[in-house]
Image (cartoon, rainbow, N blue to C red):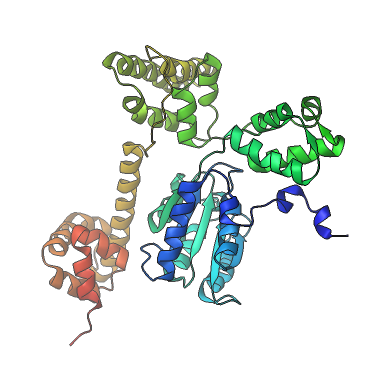
Amino acid sequence: MSSEKYLPWIIKYRPKHVNDVVNQDEAKQKLIAWLKAWEEGKVEKKAVLLHGPAGCGKTSLVEALARTFKYQLFEMNASDSRRKADIERIAKMASQTSGLTGRKLILLDEVDGLDPHADEGGVEALLGVIKNTRNPIIMTANNPYREHLRPLREVAEVIQMKRLSEKDVVSVLEKICKAENLTCDPAALKEIAKRSEGDMRSAINDLEAAAALNKKVTVDTVKATTAYRNRVYAPWEALQKLFNATYIFQAKEATTSTDLSHDEFITWINEHIPTYYETPEEIWRAYEALSRADVYLGRIIKSQNWDLLSYALEMMGPGVAFARTAYKYKWKPFKMPERIKLLAESRRSREYREALAEILAARLLTSKAIVMSDVIPYLRVIFTQNPAYAAKIARGYRLPEELVTWLAGPRAKEVLGYVKKPKK
């Protein structure tokens, strides 16, 4: 008797070919194009950060990609082997060696599981692996826009996968029912798909549980064996839910359906109000509601009166959602809020400034404060105006490439070119 009979359905019916992955055409095209560019030696970024909600098929797509293009897959769960030493030992070795077939594809799963405090050094270790890898690397994440993942976003090509629709989930469940000779009520499959909220993995598990109870899968069977799940949505998905809400409870749920703090979610809403609303009246009403929510949150921080939170959620949820004068479903592309970008850039700039001051203070026998106020401003002028002379300074003080790039700005390539030229 075949051992496949005893496999969990989530493994038994995992996509074998890239074409078997449903409704992710854009992500598949980008991923295949990147892999072909790698094979031709024309790839700009050595890694991909593949992201999307749980159960949309990220890991399955990478596994199918490896099978389709005959790569040996090396898989490592970054949230399990999260220590710096583990990543450097396991992933670094894999990135430097060939597969048995000559080609290896590295999958680093769930990189957003790295804790910036408990797993200090994990992201830096991954950056080192990516920089020196000889094999293509694909990382997966549910939410890639957490602050501690910013360095990985900068060195990787970011590719998004969509949340699956109920229709997509039902189509896969119908194929499994046929393969397992199950009698499945169409309404039962729709109920499973509805409860899964686009999570194919949980939908297949629910179907298997219902089939174990009764070979005829009905709506009653599904209700007896499955439950609705509380999903954590990515910021842009929560925005879609908020701005397209048709009921007050939907708008309010959107404000608590993401792992962003209330202040962070207000920043995202603030950035996208002009994107979703068109008339001056709608925009004014939405900002008025959002400003009231911000006032309530400020009073909570000042007085620690958390009874006010419900008022803040009412304003930032239904208050913003129903600022529109007429309902019309809109899908709009999301973008990272400019305020968050500026904060990240200024923080990184301060870090580079501190690091440079520490290096130069030890060499110049002066304080870091004096270096920052009296030396670094002149260095920035030299590095942006005279690349050849700047390269001599960089070599003389053995400045790291990152600090040279920061000092030189738009002329960084010129300066680094002079730095790497052999001495005559």
* Residue drawn at x 17%, y 59% as measured from the top left: 380
Q: Position of residue 237 (x, y in %)?
A: 49, 33
Q: Please, which residue is most extreme toward the bottom here? A: 424
Q: Nearer the viewer, residue 23 or 347?
A: 23
**Residue at left offset 57%, top offset 71%:** 89
Which residue shows up at 18% across the image and 62% down it?
411
Image position of 253 with respect to 183: above or below = above
Q: Is residue 121 visible?
A: no
Occupied quadrant, residue 351: bottom left
State the quadrant of the N terminus: bottom right
Query: In this view of the protein, can residue 138 be seen by the observer?
Result: yes
* x then y, percent, for residue 204: 71, 41
- The part of the image, by quadrant, that contains residue 364 is bottom left
* Residue 368, quarter of picture: bottom left
* Residue 317 in the figure: left or right of residue 15: left
Q: Is residue 223 above or below residue 235?
A: above
Taking the image as shown, residue 197 lies to the left or right of residue 269, namely right
* Nearer-the-camera pick, 346 or 87: 87
Q: Position of residue 210 (x, y in %)?
A: 80, 35
In-image side of 415 versus 72 (left or right): left
Whether residue 227 sits left or right of residue 85 in the image: it is: right
